[in-house]
Image: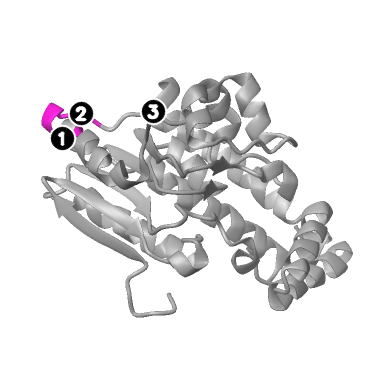
Amino acid sequence: MSSTSAPLVLSTTRNQVTTLTMNLPARLNGWTMEMIAALQAALARAATDEGTRAVILTGSDPYYSAGVNLGAAIQLGHPRALRAMIIEHNQSLFDAFINFPKPILIAANGPAIGACVTTATLCDGIIASERATFSTPFAALGVPPEGCSSVHFPRLLGDTASTRMLGKEGWKPTAEEALSVGLVQWVVPHAALLTEAQKIAEGWVQAGTPRTYRAGATREELLAVNARESVQVADAFLSTPFLDGQFRFLWSKKKRGPALTFLALRLTRPAWSRLL
């Protein structure tokens, strides 16, 4: 739950456009397990709401979202159950966006990191505030690309920009740079972001625009890619380099509890890895 009684995802509807706002600014709208559940529930409601024909997803300033909280996502348990849990949670997160049946526009109001970037590319469009940046630090974390980015990014951005973002360089484009490589379609002044997003979404409603996928992708293809990547992500999450890296990172941030979880997994890996 959030630190206050405020909902984790706010919802407002105007002219058949529903705006969903991630509302955990004190934690940079990070995708905790609770936030992910609230977001999936909000999308499910919008999907079946007869008064909603398009959706805008944004965040409470200053961040769009700091992405998935890995320390909170992995907990000790039987190795097979842990691996299955990682696969299920990763796949269901991205499937919620892939399967969403109505046009969905991302309004990136600030920095976006990791899964919130890859899910954004699975939507119909991205409009960015001038304050937005986009980071996919998978290589630095020792995990493979997720959210269909192994296939979708090269098509969407081209091989060079895709490699810069997904590879060891860890390129974090600004809004204007993201526009230049095709990651986003519009960049506007911060104060105008939601006004312009509303105009775009209302235009989709008036035109009867159906749900689409960028770069020529299809729903069936993206679901298959996500299923395959989710297995690869789970295997990487249980690897020695990832466990070591997460322990060092979390310990450096003085997050002792989550850090010790990864240390325990790392130290006992020779035994439990045979059970996978």
Residue 138 is marked as none
Q: Nearer the viewer, mark 3 or mark 2?
A: 3
Spot occupied by residue 134 in the image (x, y as percentages of width and height):
54, 41
User: Residue 12: x percent and y percent?
Assistant: 20, 57
Residue mark closest to the camera, 1 vs 3: 3
Mark 3, residues whose alpha carbon is within 10 Å: few (<14), some, or many (≥20)? some
Q: Tell me the amino acid under the disc marked 3.
A: Gln
- Residues marked 2 and 1 touching at CB (< 8 Å): yes
Label 2 sits on residue? 209
> Where's residue 160, x and y in %?
65, 21
Left or right side of 193 for 166: right
Q: Amino acid at mark 1?
A: Val
Name which of mark 3 and mark 2 comes first in the sequence: 3
Q: Is any part of residue 212 visible from this angle?
A: yes
User: Quarter-wise, where is residue 260 in the image?
Assistant: bottom right
**Mark pair 3, 2: CA separation:** 17 Å
Left or right placement of residue 113 versus residue 11 in this view:
right
Q: Residue drawn 17% across and 37% down?
A: 202
80 relative position to 65: left or right: right
Q: Residues within 10 Å of mark 1 (few under 14, many from 20)?
A: many
Q: Is 258 inside the magenta-drawn segment? A: no
Q: Please, is residue 274 above or below residue 223 in the view?
A: below
Residue drawn at x 46%, y 61% is 29
Residue 185 image label:
3
Indicate yes or no whether the magenta region holds residue 209: yes
Q: Secondary structure at mark 2?
A: loop
